[in-house]
Amino acid sequence: MNNYFTLKNEIIMLQKGDKTPAVTLQDQNGKQFDTASLTGKKTILYFYPKDNTSGCTAEACSLNGGLDEWAKQGYQIVGVSPDSPSSHQKFIAKYSLNFTLLADTEKELATAFGVWAEKSMYGRKYMGILRTTFVIDEQGIITHVIEKVNTKTHSEQLKAVLL
C-alpha cells in the first residue's frame, strides 16, 4: 500500500507530520537502500531533476559544502533523482560529493512523496521532479518541507530553518 494520497487524480505532496514512505531503491553503487533505514537518523532528503545540470549541480555542491556542519548537527544528506546509479557515480566523482544519491528510475519514491508531477515549460506540459527538500526526524516523520529551493545557497537556506 502506498503512503501518498490522490485527489481527482492529483498526487498530494507529503507535508510536515507525515511518515516517510517505505520504498527500496538502488544507491549510486547499485546497493539496495530501504527508506525504512532512515529511522533512527535525522535526514535531509532532497529531490532534484537531473544529474549534471546547472541548478542540480549548484544544489548538490551547496549541500556538500555544508556537510561537516550537518554531520555535527546529526544530519545525513540523501539526494534522489530519476537518474541511474552509473549517472550518480559520475556526478559524485565529478563534484566530489560525499553523500548518498538514490536512483529513483521508476519514480516510485518521488511519487510516494508527491514530487513527481506535471510541470510546464514554454507552454509544454510534461512529468518531472518538483525540486523539494524534506527534513526527516529520527522517527521517520517529516519535520520540514522546502518547496522553494534556492539551489546556489540551499545549505544556508536549510540552516536558517533548522539551526
Image: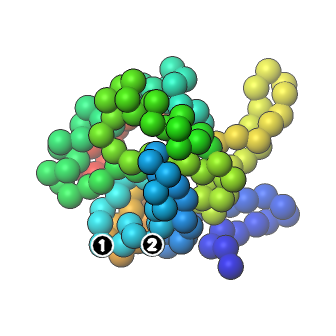
Image quarter of residue 58: top left
Residue type, mark 2 in image: Ala
Q: Is residue 47 visible?
A: no
Q: Which residue is mark 2?
A: 36
**Residue drawn 63% across and 63% down?**
112
Left or right: where 67 falls relative to 16: left
Residue type, mark 1 in image: Gly
Mark 2 touching mark 1, by CB under 8 A? no
Residue 163 coordinates in the image, percent (x, y): 22, 49
Image quarter of residue 23: bottom right
Q: Residues within 10 Å of mark 2 (few under 14, many from 20)?
A: some
Q: Is residue 87 visible?
A: yes
**Residue drawn 45% across and 72% down?**
36
Examine the rendered structure and indicate whether residue 53 appears above or below residue 79: above
Q: Which residue is mark 1?
A: 40
Examine the rendered structure and indicate whether residue 56 appears above or below residue 40: above
Q: Name the foreground residue: 147 vs 69.
A: 69
Disc 1, SS? loop
Left or right: where 76 falls relative to 83: left
- Calculate the distance from the C-alpha at mark 2 to the C-alpha at mark 1: 9 Å
Residue 105 coordinates in the image, percent (x, y): 65, 48
Residue 161 coordinates in the image, percent (x, y): 32, 48
Q: Residues within 10 Å of mark 1 (few under 14, many from 20)?
A: few
**Residue drawn 54% across and 65% down?**
24
Left or right: where 48 falls relative to 69: right
Disc 2, SS? helix
Examine the rendered structure and indicate whether residue 14 appears above or below residue 72: below
Q: Name the foreground residue: 22 vs 127.
A: 22
